[in-house]
Image (cartoon, rainbow, N blue to C red):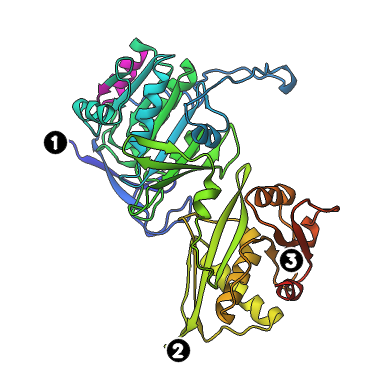
């Protein structure tokens, strides 16, 4: 009997190793090697011919100036928020990966999109996790038009490609990439090799035929996309659909996009008829109570290509333990500790013996540094138990030496705040307008001490 071959594959970068070891030699990650059985030696099928992810074989060397540049036509999904995250719409020949936690609404969103697109072009929905009656029941529950969309329940890569070649769809949805398997790879579905080869084959098909490929991806318990890291390098656009189970709002954020801006944010609301786009996200994130309370500040963050007004709350309380707690929800934990040190050194406020809790209302994750000044204002307001004015908005980056640094797109942030009824703004001196801004008082500050005096 032929001896079975075994390899150890890194789940982060996909590199192969002959034996197990604690650290991957290629990416340096620890405890990421998983055992992969390749089948008996000598009985493996011949490996397929590699053609590259772009689907081009034997390409000739050309001068950059001689490469023909054609405008990439975009196809609207029917959702303005989805088109915004994609950079304007779906591009022919692109591969898009949509991930998210179970129950976030990935299949619901794609079914709504395809039922709309099927009225104008050929679409194919391939499901490997749900049966066709389940898809039909969802379409009936969402009141979608189902007489133009083609469905297929299959998990074999070769059969899916055969169906795609026969039907020639303009948009192809695969739900999901983790359940597909190829006969050329001797491993279980969902393994590193299967996910990598299936994604590469589907991407090559999309590039060669000009088909828009939408793949659904699973996530790990840490919230990252499951599978090898090379999966995110193969595709053109990576999108995460996020949302908690106790909230009906869902956020669609792009982490990679070869055809548009990254970190673009789209907001949807889950209703009985599926996902509905939210045209004005700032309105739902600024749903403040009637009673003015301390520890609340409104800031303007820049998400992709548009400003967004969100409320940040802070609670400072006496600690009953020797090690005070620092909890940040929606913000970076290490940056909170750094800003508290800056507040003590350059603001004269000692909160070393206090528990500090910070939360961004609405479940939004703020990744930029323009929220530093608003965060400190909320902490000072809670510590002194003094509410801040309701019509005041704050943004700015705080340096380690106590200086207030300007942030990008300052004028657009002020215009968005004025549109929502804010009449006063405390901003970095570099973002203050040269002239007067009608209907708004703008105070430009250079240091943290000046900012604290302004309130």
Distance between the alpha carbons at the discs numbered 1 and 3: 72 Å
Q: Quadrant of residue 320?
A: bottom left
Q: Quadrant of the N terminus?
A: top left
Q: Nearer the viewer, mark 2 or mark 1?
A: 2
Please tell me which residue lies in front, 39 or 395: 395
Q: Tag 2's secondary structure?
A: loop
Q: Is residue 231 above or below residue 101?
A: above
Whichever of callouts 2 and 3 sits on the residue coming sooner in the sequence is: 2
Q: What residue is pinned by disc 2?
A: 322
Q: Quadrant of the C terminus?
A: bottom right
Which residue is found at the position 78% from the left and 63% from the top?
A: 444
Q: Quadrant of residue 162?
A: top left
Horizontal and vertical percent position of residue 144: 32, 25
Distance between the alpha carbons at the discs numbered 2 and 3: 32 Å
Horizontal and vertical percent position of residue 77: 47, 26
Q: What residue is pinned by disc 3?
A: 404
Please tell me which residue lies in front, 231 or 357: 357
Horizontal and vertical percent position of residue 234: 48, 34
Q: What residue is pinned by disc 1?
A: 1
- Mark 3: few/some/many CA within 10 Å (<14, 14-19, 20+): many
């Amino acid at each position: 009997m032929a001896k079975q071959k075994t390899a150890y594959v890194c789940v982060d970068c996909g590199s192969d190793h002959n034996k197990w070891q604690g650290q991957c030699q290629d990416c340096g990650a620890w405890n990421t090697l998983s055992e992969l059985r390749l089948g008996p030696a000598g009985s493996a099928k011949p490996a397929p011919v590699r053609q590259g992810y772009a689907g081009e074989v034997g390409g000739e060397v050309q001068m950059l100036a001689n490469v023909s540049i054609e405008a990439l036509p975009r196809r609207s999904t029917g959702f303005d928020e989805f088109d915004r995250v994609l950079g304007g719409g779906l591009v022919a020949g692109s591969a898009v990966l949509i991930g998210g936690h179970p129950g976030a609404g990935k299949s619901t969103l794609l079914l709504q999109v395809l039922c709309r697109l099927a009225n104008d072009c050929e679409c194919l929905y391939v499901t490997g996790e749900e049966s066709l009656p389940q898809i039909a029941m969802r379409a009936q529950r969402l009141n979608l038009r189902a007489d133009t969309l083609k469905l297929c329940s299959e998990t074999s890569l070769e059969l899916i490609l055969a169906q795609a070649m026969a039907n020639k769809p303009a948009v192809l949805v695969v739900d999901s990439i983790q359940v597909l398997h190829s006969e050329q790879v001797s491993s279980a579905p969902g393994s590193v090799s299967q996910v990598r080869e299936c994604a590469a084959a589907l991407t090559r098909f999309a590039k060669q035929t000009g088909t828009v490929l939408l793949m659904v991806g699973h996530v790990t318990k840490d919230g990252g996309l499951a599978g090898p890291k090379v999966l995110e390098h193969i595709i053109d656009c990576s999108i995460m659909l996020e949302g908690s189970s106790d909230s009906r709002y869902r956020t669609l954020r792009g982490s990679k996009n070869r055809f548009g801006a990254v970190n673009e944010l789209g907001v949807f609301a889950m209703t009985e008829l599926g996902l509905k786009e939210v045209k004005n996200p700032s309105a739902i994130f600024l749903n403040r109570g009637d009673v003015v309370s301390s520890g609340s500040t409104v800031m303007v963050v820049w998400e992709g290509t548009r400003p967004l007004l969100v409320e940040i709350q802070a609670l400072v309380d006496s600690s009953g333990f020797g090690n005070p707690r620092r909890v940040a929800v929606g913000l970076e934990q290490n940056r909170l500790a750094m800003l508290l040190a800056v507040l003590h050194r350059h603001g004269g406020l000692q909160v070393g013996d206090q528990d500090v809790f910070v939360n961004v209302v609405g479940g939004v994750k703020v990744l930029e540094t323009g929220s530093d000044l608003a965060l400190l204002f909320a902490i000072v307001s809670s510590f002194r138990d003094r509410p801040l004015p309701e019509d005041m908005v704050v943004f700015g980056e705080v340096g380690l030496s106590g200086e207030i640094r300007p942030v990008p797109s300052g004028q657009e942030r002020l215009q968005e705040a004025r549109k929502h009824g804010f009449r006063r703004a405390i901003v970095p001196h570099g973002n203050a307008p040269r002239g007067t801004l009608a209907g708004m008082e703008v105070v430009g500050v250079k240091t943290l001490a000046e900012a604290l005096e302004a309130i």
